[in-house]
Amino acid sequence: MKKMQLEICCGTTCYMMGANRLLYIENEVPPELRGKFEVKALPCMGLCNDKNLSGAPYVKLNGIIIENATIEKICDKMRAMLDD
Amino acid sequence: MYSQLFVEMESFQFTKTGQAACGDDIQIKVLKDENRYLAVLSDGLGSGVKAHVLANMTTTMALRYLQSNMDTLQSVETIMDSLPVCEVRKISYSTFSMIDLRLGGITRIVEMGNPQYIQLRGTEEVQPLKHETIVSKHWPDRQVECYELKMIPGDRLIVSSDGVTQSGLGEGPQYRFGWRRSGEMEYARARISSNPEISSFSLARSIAYQAYGISKNTCKDDISCMVIYMRKPRVMRLLTGPPFHKDHDIDFAKCANLGEEHTIVCGGTTANILERVIDRKVEIDISKLRRDDKLPPAGRLPGVAMVTEGILTLTRVCKALEDSEPTDSLPETARKIIEMMKQHDKIEFVVGTKVNEAHQDPSLPQDLELRRGIIRRISSALNQKFRKETEITFF
Ligand code: FES
């Protein structure tokens, strides 16, 4: 199965709001998610200035934006994606 | 020809093993308006704090006399008269070399008790135009060597304390008289022949390390080496921040044209502009992340040395420069930026002035200073603390 693509924004705002911790997500996910995704870091994705979004840090999972991202939130989305 | 030149003056020192302070002192002063580059290296008699104070008194006085064009004999005598005299040896408490380099003119070197300077053109030694030994009436047992020489682009001057030339003294038959000036010169020539563009700092460090190694990695005396290299300036460019008007993006991006080793991009939006122009994507390597790095990781983009995050990284660079922090303990990106700055003579900042609204959000955990202010502070720290030339262009 194709691995899920997780893009983590490392721009100023996202980094300050917690993206630095997200970068280590591979070590922190539960066993069932290990090896199921690939992590890529990106410079500012330009989302931090979008007033319609609710807040940094931003990540994209298979292109879908996750706002106020935390490791738990990302894991939930991954599980949902695997279930589909 | 000479107005385009840069005079790189750097030094490296080892302190005598077991001493808290280096007994040699080096001071440098650039008189830009007069096209003059002054340097003094002094070796205080003995070692440790006392020697350091004596050496420092000497360099301070000598630099002042050089600057005011005081007569050579008079300045040397004034220095020797002011320093205390060793009760046992009846000699004044320091030796020194004074260098007055004039771009396009005659360079004068005055030495009192220090090893003779070395002038190299490529790997060839250059003899002085004139050499005269003068003896002071006050100090008949001390000789003052005065040299006049011509420095042309590409030339190097190497000035060392006797801790370099006498290193290894007594370490087997090869070093019966120490490394000597001839050994030091041979070594410098070999280094230059394998790396003709070697920087003053690298050469001075390399000579000092060699002297240290010859002494079996202990310093029996303070080791100081200064290298003065006259050459074309090395220019680097740092691009940061998107331009105020979007229409200027292309002109802004064109400034990243100095070559891969001389260009840094700091800021995600800045990187995005370049990505669009060259139609390539920034790649960030997270395989070597260190948890204690505290700054976002660096990215790669063809044509530039490195892409980093903007304001947090620049703020860290600014603080490190202002506080003269050792680079080893800095986060990777800040360390690389500062090292690159140190390897260049002129740093050009190309600064976009558009303010990122997201950075003004009061709920951010840290206040962010405006880019313009940070760059001005970095620029003045580079001018004042590192004698770098800087230029800021706003977009
Ligand atoms: S910093 Fe992450 S979207 Fe701008």
Image (cartoon, rainbow, N blue to C red):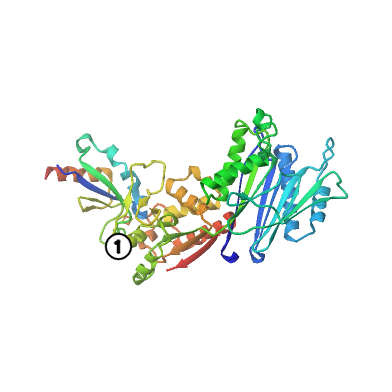
On the rendered structure, is B201 left or right of B100? left
The residue at the point 71 percent across, 42 percent down is B52
How far across and down, in percent of the image, does residue B236 sit? Answer: 47, 58
Q: Label 1 lies in what chain?
A: B
Residue B385: image location, x then y, percent: 58, 54
Q: Residue at x 73, y 40 (%)?
A: B51
Q: Horizontal and vertical percent for residue B100? A: 70, 57
Residue in the image at 26% along x and 58% along y: A53
Amino acid type, callout 1: Arg
Q: In this view, does B359 lie above or below B170?
A: below
Callout count: 1
Quadrant in which the C terminus of chain B appears: bottom left
Nearer the observer, B123 or B348:
B123
Q: Mark 1 points at which residue?
A: B276
Mark 1 CB near ligand 1 (8 Å cut): no
Name which quarter of the figure residue B243 lies in: bottom left
| Quarter-of-image position of residue B274 | bottom left
**Vertically, is B386 above or below B354?**
above
Q: Which residue lies furthest to the right in this view?
A: B137
Task: Tell me the quarter of the image containing the N terminus of chain B.
Answer: bottom right
